[in-house]
Amino acid sequence: MSDQKHNIVWSSEQGDLRRQTKTSNVVSLPPQQQTVYLHRESSGRGGKAVTLVKKLVLSADDLGTLAKKLKNECGAGGTIKDGLIEIQGEHREKIAAVLQKLGYKVKIAGG
């Protein structure tokens, strides 16, 4: 017998439910009702800083639109992971200004 582990995967009519994101059925809240937290993180990234935009309650489409706007404003790349927007580089001040113009309450956290 080999040492390989055999993982059994069961799927239903809905397909692979493990790949569904948290934001799949979320209804967006208006910006005035949300407080957004901006964090700076560099651990696990080879020392390179990443700005995280947390605590957004947006649908997947709205989250993508906002991420695109923030990336354009900062002139940087980025992505969406697990309902968070990640922007490459230290851009907390720029992102805070953009979000405040859109009506969000912003708190800058982290060092």
Image (tube, grey):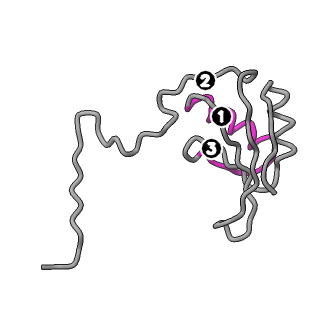
Identify the residue shown where x is 80% and y is 30%. 105
- Left or right: 92, with 71 as reference point: right
Pointer 2: residues within 10 angstroms few (<14), some, or many (20+)? some
User: Secondary structure beneath disc 2?
Assistant: loop
Q: How many marks?
A: 3
Chief secondary structure of the magenta portion: helix
The residue beneath circle 1 is: 56
Location of the C terminus (image quadrant): bottom right
Q: In the image, is residue 90 above or below residue 98?
A: below
Instruction: Give the quarter of the image for residue 13.
Output: top left
Q: Which span of residues is magenta-colored?
A: 60-80
User: Secondary structure beneath disc 3?
Assistant: strand
Tell me if label 3 and label 1 are in contact, CB under 8 Å: yes
Q: CA distance from mark 3 to mark 1?
A: 8 Å
Q: In the image, is residue 42 above or below residue 84?
A: below
- Left or right: 35, with 23 as reference point: right
Tell me if label 2 and label 3 are in contact, CB under 8 Å: no
Task: Reply yes or no: does residue 68 show up in magenta.
Answer: yes
Location of the N terminus (image quadrant): bottom left
Q: Which residue is farthest left?
A: 1
Identify the residue shown where x is 40% and y is 44%. 19
